[in-house]
Image (tube, rainbow, N blue to C red):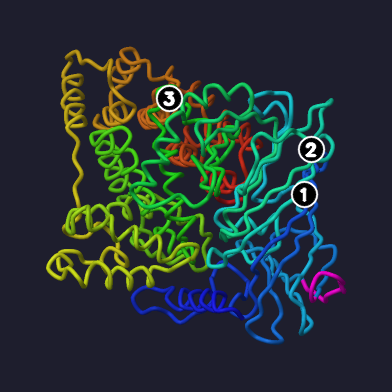
């Protein structure tokens, strides 16, 4: 055991020991993983994949380099719906021998453990397997479901615990690995004489030609399994700067390059704020509209929904958010999903600092005010147990924790620290924090200890103003929380009242954020006449801005504005972003008429949604199935 690996093991054990609230439970297992890294830990993944569009499966060989802490212990991996063909072991890779293995009973949330019995000298394990067509991380799109309409498309979404559905590994954010991959695209990956392109969350050469076989490497920057990502499609590339660029299908590539032309400037600003970017390149990939999230911060290659292509850069805060994850989330990760706020709260705070650096303080302020409003709405609907930053998810799907709480309450906590301790002191603390824990996964308990030593204790009078335990372990918003304000949004509120009173308002220069605030400043219950007037005056049912359209359609459902129902069905059947689907279906099912409409739309839309989105909407529309 080297000193470096020993230190990593010690940090992992400490993280697991500090994984439960203020009492710091002594459990050493991630409750969302069967794996046993405290006994045998995977250090490196060498992956060979055949992409079989004809069968909608991946056939793979996963070679795992392991480090053993407890002699005689088996290696336990996480799987979900994998067909394991054989398992082999080796001392040095020169000779391989069969390894005895058992695939355990499947759990509806966790999948099934793969237990592998090892010889004393074994340091390598090789698993030959194939995925199921129902793999929860994978979405296979036929040509008509893509922007180009000519070629099929595949993409993965591994967060939170979906990596196990396409790779047998220790699928816990507390286990970090390097990886190498070779991807071979099989029939019909080659259509005519034009191979499809594969890209991954690893070092990719955008200038390399299309061959149908691609190699990737991310060896010296270990990552959690949820950040391993793959996409295959008819992709083109545009450079955005020395370290940045964008991939997309041909019909979208020019729009995407224009929308995201400030990405290089964002990266430079983040470098200045929080020290150097450590991942080499920062490229973007525009996915088909069925992608279930706004973005996914896969290292070197952020996955993005096309719904942010607004044409005016008004939604590029999402790019700033995913870029911020390069520090909070990718560089320093949550060790368990109970600590998810360490990823998302920090990232939302850093995102707004990047937005301020590029687009000005007022733009960042409007984002913060709208975020505070979303937080308050979320708190009003969630039970107390789900309002806590360090959320208890034991026995639950970790996707249940992906509410606005870790994002907005976490960011508000840091914003409060900034106001109490000064921005200069918080920035210095964050730079030290990111450097101290670089390429490690930590818990809320570890963060709290570091915060106390490096920010609270040196500044006792300021520390007395921040009830840290209330922020981390209690529901609601603690006393003394920051209250962001925006002059632009205050004017919008006045304009909303003037319009309600029958007056004219000037909206020509409004940003997306101002339009959203306008809609949210109106009464929840509006008369049919007022709904028609809104649509007549501002053409909301015809807007191409997905954020504004989503908010308008929620109002339309709530107020039974039937003129928008055609647009509602078009929206729900043309994209699969979970952020939009969940609130709309939840609003629909509140009435018998709406439930009937939701069921009819979902029957048509469900085959086009990613498995993650299907699970979410099934629980809303088909709760008894």
Q: Name the mark nearer the viewer: 3 or 1.
A: 1
Q: How many marks?
A: 3
Position of residue 22 relative to residue 251, above or below, is: below
Measuring from the top left, give residue 616's x and y in whole percent.
Answer: 54, 47
Location of residue 69 by image quarter? bottom right
Q: Earlier in the sequence, mark 3 or mark 1?
A: 1
Identify the residue shown where x is 29% and y is 28%. Answer: 519
Position of residue 168 relative to residue 319, above or below, is: below
Q: Nearer the viewer, residue 229 or 178?
A: 178
Distance in Å between CA atoms under marks 1 and 2: 15 Å
Give the crowd class for mark 1: few <14, some 14-19, many >=20 residues within 10 Å.
many
Q: Earlier in the sequence, mark 1 or mark 2?
A: 1
Circle 2 residue? 212
Measuring from the top left, give residue 265's x and y in whole percent.
Answer: 40, 35
Distance in Å between CA atoms under marks 3 and 1: 36 Å
Identify the residue shown where x is 66% and y is 59%. Answer: 164
Q: Residue furthest left?
A: 461
Give the crowd class for mark 2: few <14, some 14-19, many >=20 residues within 10 Å.
some
Mark 1 touching mark 2, by CB under 8 A?
A: no
Identify the residue shown where x is 38% and y is 20%. Answer: 540
Quarter of the figure that contains the N terminus: bottom right
Location of residue 125 by image quarter? bottom right
Give the crowd class for mark 3: few <14, some 14-19, many >=20 residues within 10 Å.
some
Location of residue 463 by image quarter? bottom left
Helix, strand or loop under label 1: strand
Circle 1 residue? 58
Q: Name the mark nearer the viewer: 1 or 2.
A: 2
Q: Which residues are magenta?
A: 91-102
Q: Is residue 498 left or right of residue 143?
A: left
Kindly identify which numbered label has been placed on residue 545: 3
Q: Is residue 385 magenta?
A: no
């Amino acid at each position: 055991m080297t000193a470096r690996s020993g230190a990593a093991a010690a940090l992992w054990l400490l993280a697991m020991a500090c994984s439960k609230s203020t009492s710091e439970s002594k459990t050493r297992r991630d409750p969302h993983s069967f794996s046993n890294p405290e006994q045998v830990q995977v250090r490196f993944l060498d992956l060979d994949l055949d992409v079989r569009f004809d069968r909608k499966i991946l056939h793979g060989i996963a070679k795992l380099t392991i480090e053993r802490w407890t002699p005689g212990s088996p290696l336990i991996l996480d799987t979900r719906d994998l067909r394991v063909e054989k398992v082999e072991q080796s001392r040095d890779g020169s000779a391989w021998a069969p390894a005895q293995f058992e695939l355990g009973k499947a759990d509806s949330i966790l999948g099934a453990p793969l237990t592998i019995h090892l010889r004393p000298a074994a340091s390598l394990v090789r698993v030959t397997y194939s995925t199921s067509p129902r793999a929860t991380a994978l979405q296979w799109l036929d040509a008509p479901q893509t922007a180009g309409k000519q070629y099929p498309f595949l993409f993965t979404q591994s967060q939170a615990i979906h990596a196990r559905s396409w790779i047998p590994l220790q699928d816990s954010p507390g286990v970090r690995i390097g990886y190498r991959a070779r991807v071979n695209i099989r029939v019909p990956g080659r259509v005519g004489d034009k191979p499809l392109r594969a890209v991954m969350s690893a070092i990719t050469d955008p200038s390399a030609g299309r061959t149908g076989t691609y190699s990737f490497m991310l060896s010296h920057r270990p990552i959690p399994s949820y950040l391993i990502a793959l996409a295959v499609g008819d992709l083109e590339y545009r450079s955005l700067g020395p370290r940045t660029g964008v991939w997309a299908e041909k019909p979208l590539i020019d729009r995407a390059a224009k929308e995201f032309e400030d990405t290089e400037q964002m990266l430079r600003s983040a470098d200045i704020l929080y020290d150097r970017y450590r991942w080499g390149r920062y490229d973007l990939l525009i996915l088909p509209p069925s992608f279930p999230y706004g973005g996914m911060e896969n290292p070197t290659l952020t996955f993005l929904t096309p719904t942010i292509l607004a044409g005016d850069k008004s939604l590029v805060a999402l790019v700033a958010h995913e870029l911020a994850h390069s520090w909070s989330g990718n560089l320093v990760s949550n060790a368990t999903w109970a600590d998810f706020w360490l990823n998302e709260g920090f990232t939302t705070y850093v995102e707004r600092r990047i937005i301020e650096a590029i687009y000005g303080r007022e733009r960042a302020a409007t984002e913060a005010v709208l975020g505070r409003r979303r937080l308050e709405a979320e708190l009003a609907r969630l039970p107390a147990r789900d309002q806590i930053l360090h959320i208890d998810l034991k026995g639950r799907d970790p996707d249940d924790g992906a509410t606005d709480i870790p994002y907005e309450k976490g960011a508000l906590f840091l914003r409060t620290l900034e106001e109490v301790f000064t921005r200069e002191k918080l920035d210095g603390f964050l730079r030290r924090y990111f450097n101290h824990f670089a390429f490690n996964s930590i818990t809320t308990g570890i963060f709290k200890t570091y915060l106390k030593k490096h920010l609270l204790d040196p500044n006792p009078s300021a520390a007395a103003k921040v009830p840290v335990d209330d922020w981390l372990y209690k529901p609601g918003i603690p006393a003394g929380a920051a209250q962001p304000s925006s002059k632009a949004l205050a004017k919008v509120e006045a304009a909303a009242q003037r319009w309600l009173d029958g007056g004219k308002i000037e909206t020509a220069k409004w940003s997306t954020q101002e339009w959203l605030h306008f809609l949210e400043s109106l009464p929840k219950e509006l008369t049919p006449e007022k709904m028609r007037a809104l649509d007549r005056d501002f053409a909301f049912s015809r807007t191409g801005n997905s954020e504004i359209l989503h908010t308008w359609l929620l109002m339309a459902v709530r107020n039974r504005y039937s003129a928008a129902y055609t647009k509602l069905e078009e929206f729900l059947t043309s994209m699969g972003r979970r952020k939009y689907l969940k609130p709309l279906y939840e609003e629909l099912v509140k009435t018998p008429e709406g439930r009937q409409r939701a069921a009819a739309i979902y029957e048509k839309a469900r085959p086009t949604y990613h498995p993650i989105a299907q699970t979410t909407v099934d629980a809303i529309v088909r709760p008894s199935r």
